[in-house]
Amino acid sequence: MTLPYLRNRLPLVLTVTVLVFLDIATPSHSWKCLFPPSRVKFQGSQSVLSVQRRRELLLDGPTLEIEAGSMTVLTGPSGAGKTLWMKEMMACLNGSEQMGDGISCAEGSGAEKLRGVWCDRYTVSRSKQAPSVSLSIIESVESKLTPPCVLFVDELVDTESMPVRRAVYKGVNDLCREKMCAAVWATHKFEGLSGRRVGLRNGRLVSTTELHAHLGGEGGGGGEEVVESVVEPKVEPEVGPEVDEQPPPYSPAPTPNSSSISPLVSDVLIKTNEFFRTATISPVRNFLTIPSNPPPSSPLAPLEAALSPPTLPPIPRPTWLTISMSVPTGLLWYGYYKFSVEEELFQMELRQTGRVSGAGGYGTLIGFSYAVIFGGFFSLLPLTEGFSELILRTAGVLLLASQVNLYCRVNELCEEVGIDRPLHPWWALLPPPLDVVVGLRQVHYLALYATKIREEEWQRDKVAEEWFPFISSERFTLKEFVREPRRWFRLPFLNTEEWEDFW
């Protein structure tokens, strides 16, 4: 009895062992670091080039190193030389004789394989047949990508509304990561655009230290804050077309990685959601339906938030509320929570890009419920026990896969609002209580994300931020979690904050 049990579960044990080893042994906590990407270095070569407005820019400064899959944002006022720098970099990569005299390309790992691709609002087409403007732009950019390459994006969506800009930033960056291409952005409107920021002043790459000295500051400082606060001589901006910046009643925040999902996979997920939605009784379906134009968001009382149907923008459901509603109901309310967040993220993706990366609340929870019902029914019939077990096992695997996918999406959403990725998605595969640890962290950080996009004031969560600090802590490995008890508890009767590390 024992030997067959262990033999059936040996692949799972071996898989978890390998994953734990990778998590502990990989310093950057990213398995991609095992495969070094192509990279290229650019260095200004002291050449003076004349540009618009009869100004001369000196292309000089620190070395700019770009790796495949990385995102770089060139910041600076109009006339700082962002477009010129990118054209010089692209000409240097492609070996053009017309330009490329102002910047030299250093020999880097795989540099000879990279080529430059240019995108701006004049070279990227917008299809009227696409479900949305953002999806049309993303698809047009995708058609230009021929990996490995460096994509130079010059003020591509600066004239678009904020929701469109944020969706395009997310979609294009996702495409570049997927295809192992680098992206270099030049834009004046970089809210929601993730990536390393590099300052430009009079055509010169400026380091953080130099910028801080230029501003009269003392000591170090965050490069991002310094770059954004550079003061330059006033230059008349270029006059562009008037654009209506008024957003619709609800404009979804940056979506998860749905724009890079295969259309076939997305269609299957959408059909799955629609199928189980129609299989839900009308009163329940009507209560759970998210309106096409939700009213403006407003803060909700705790009980109101707990009993509210799914809505957009997503409702913040903090950890203390999730626990206090789940425990007394025997985790029934947690099932409702799981349905709500899955359906909210599903609708966000669908309305923003026309594609989805999950099956939503209907395809996930309602589908799982039907599997349990039919699996239990077949277990009562003679000669169908094996079929019943197949249904239940398949449903369990799909539910676990949806949980891993949810953690991936929460990571991406957090990154879009300036929060470092908090979760290791594969922890969902670990046995209790480790899977509970990552589940509680997902609840906390998704509530924090929802609070930010609803522009509400965050109410301190005593459970997550005081009693159990591992819930709100920065991301850690299994090794760090076991070794550092300071993350564990700060309860009145058990406080491990002062405990020393075990090794």
Image (tube, rainbow, N blue to C red):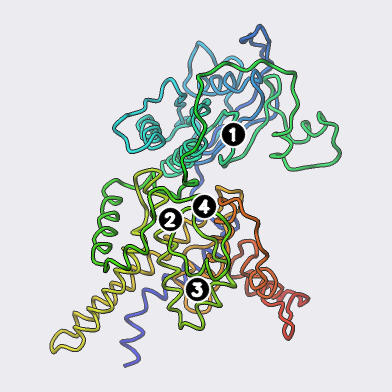
Q: CA distance from mark 2 to mark 3?
A: 21 Å
Q: Split into 4 quadrants, where in the image is the N terminus?
A: bottom left
Asked which secondary structure carries label 2, the reply is helix
Please give the residue where the numbered disc 1 appears in the rendered image.
73
Asked which secondary structure carries label 4, the reply is helix
Q: Is residue 100 left or right of residue 255?
A: right
In the rendered image, residue 247, in percent from the top left (x then y), is placed at 49, 38
Disc 3 versus disc 4: nearer the observer: 4
Disc 1 versus disc 2: nearer the observer: 2
Residue at the left extreme of this rendering? 383
Which badge, 1 or 4, is on the more N-terminal residue? 1
Please give the residue where the numbered disc 2 appears in the rendered image.
345
Q: Is residue 473 above or below residue 351?
A: below
Q: Are marks 3 and 4 in contact (CB under 8 Å)?
A: no
Label number found at residue 435: 3
Question: Is residue 58 shown to the viewer in this render?
Answer: yes
Please tell me how crowded label 4 is: few (under 14), some (14-19), or many (20+) other residues with Cα within 10 Å: many
